[in-house]
Amino acid sequence: MNDSGCSMSGESCPIGGRIIQLKSVDSTNDYAWNLALEGAKHGLVVVADQQTGGRGRLGRSWLSPPGMNLAFSLVLRPSLPPQDIPPLSLVAAVALFSCLETYIPRLSIKWPNDLYCGDRKLAGILSEMKLKGRETDFVIVGIGVNVNTMVDDWPLELQSTAISMRQAVDKIFALRELFQQFLTSFQSWYEYYLSHGFHGSVQQVLEKNSYLFGKQVTIAINGRTIQGRAGNVDEYGRLLVYDRREVCWPVVAGEATMMEMGDPEKRGDDNDSGG
Ligand code: BTN
């Protein structure tokens, strides 16, 4: 991996045009956030062999033991209004899905930010945005993929809910190659999203490979709870949830908390299915 700077400006810097590789860090999201505050350019990627304070959504922790998994964060400076930022997590999920689907069977995307293998979590995405006035200043997209961890590497409470690529197919993966493949994949999906928006290919990949489709879900939105059957994702990246009267509730990723049977979110665990 390299640490070369990108001399281009704005979004013309390729994703991964500059990569900072760290042995150990509390959280690559926090590290990337601080660099972005100091003016880091679009496309910078921070990757770490180990995180000591990795974070998941909803204040949970994300485990990243040394040298086993992928944990990295992208600095993005999209010329998009804040309301178009939440779907970027899904764009990242689609990019990760297209990169991993050739290796991993029964892979699906759990709206809004997880990859599942069967019923177990393989990867998670944590996107965080900073505004400048009413405009988007930058977005940090943090990605954790359980690559080479084995069952004993998980704490007991995660052993039945988390899975790694190695556990899924009994093979050890080269982290560097996977990482580069993801960056290439993300670059093209990101460009696609900027020029075409969410509908079209991004929406199609989500529809075809949705973990939640047809399942009963409970979603908390701004202090209110909606229960119903998960449908497809619409052209804005919103999950369509149908209540018992078949009334459709479009749910925006950035505002919702997913809860469902068997989901740690429902049980109130503070560890995430990271590895
Ligand atoms: C989730 O599933 O809740 C999101 C998990 C995101 C974990 C990644 S690992 C790299 C980056 N740094 C962090 O502290 N979190 C994200």
Image: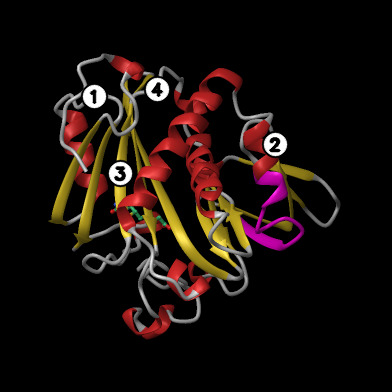
Write the start and end of the magenta stretch as one range.
206-219
Side of 84 where 212 appears, left or right: right
Q: Earlier in the sequence, mark 4 or mark 1?
A: 1
Outermost residue, top direction? 9
Q: In terms of secondary structure, where does tag 1 sit? A: loop
* Amino acid type, label 2: Asp
Q: CA distance from mark 3 to mark 2?
A: 27 Å
The residue sitting at 44% across, 81% down in the picture is 159
Q: Residue at x 38, y 69 (%)?
A: 172
Q: Which residue is mark 3?
A: 73
Upstream in sequence: badge 2 or badge 1: 1
Kindly check if marks 4 and 3 are in contact, taking CB atoms under 8 A apart as contact. no
CA–CA distance in space, label 3 to label 1: 13 Å
Secondary structure at numbered mark 2:
loop
Considering only order in the chain, which callout, 2 or 4, is on the residue closer to the N terminus? 4
Residue type at mark 3: give it: Ser
Q: Which mark is residue 234?
A: 2
Question: Is 143 included in the stretch rendered in magenta?
Answer: no
3D distance between C-alphas at marks 4 and 2: 21 Å
In the depicted structure, whether residue 145 falls above or below residue 256: below
The reply to whether the C-beta atoms of the residues labelled 3 and 2 are less than 8 Å apart is no
Q: What scheme was used to colour the molecule? A: secondary structure
- Residue 103, image x, y percentages: 53, 60
Task: Tell me whether circle 3 and circle 1 mark residues in contact (CB < 8 Å).
Answer: no
Disc 4 marks which amino acid? Pro
Q: Quadrant of ligand 1?
A: bottom left
Gap in Å between the C-alphas at discs 4 and 3? 15 Å
Number of residues whose C-alpha sits closer than 10 Å to that of mark 3, classed few (under 14), some (14–19) or many (20 or more): many
Q: What is the three-letter code of the residue carrying label 1?
A: Lys
Question: In the rendering, at what x and y percent does residue 86 appear?
Answer: 49, 36
**Image-quadrant location for residue 180:** top left
Where is residue 150? Give x, y as percent.
38, 78
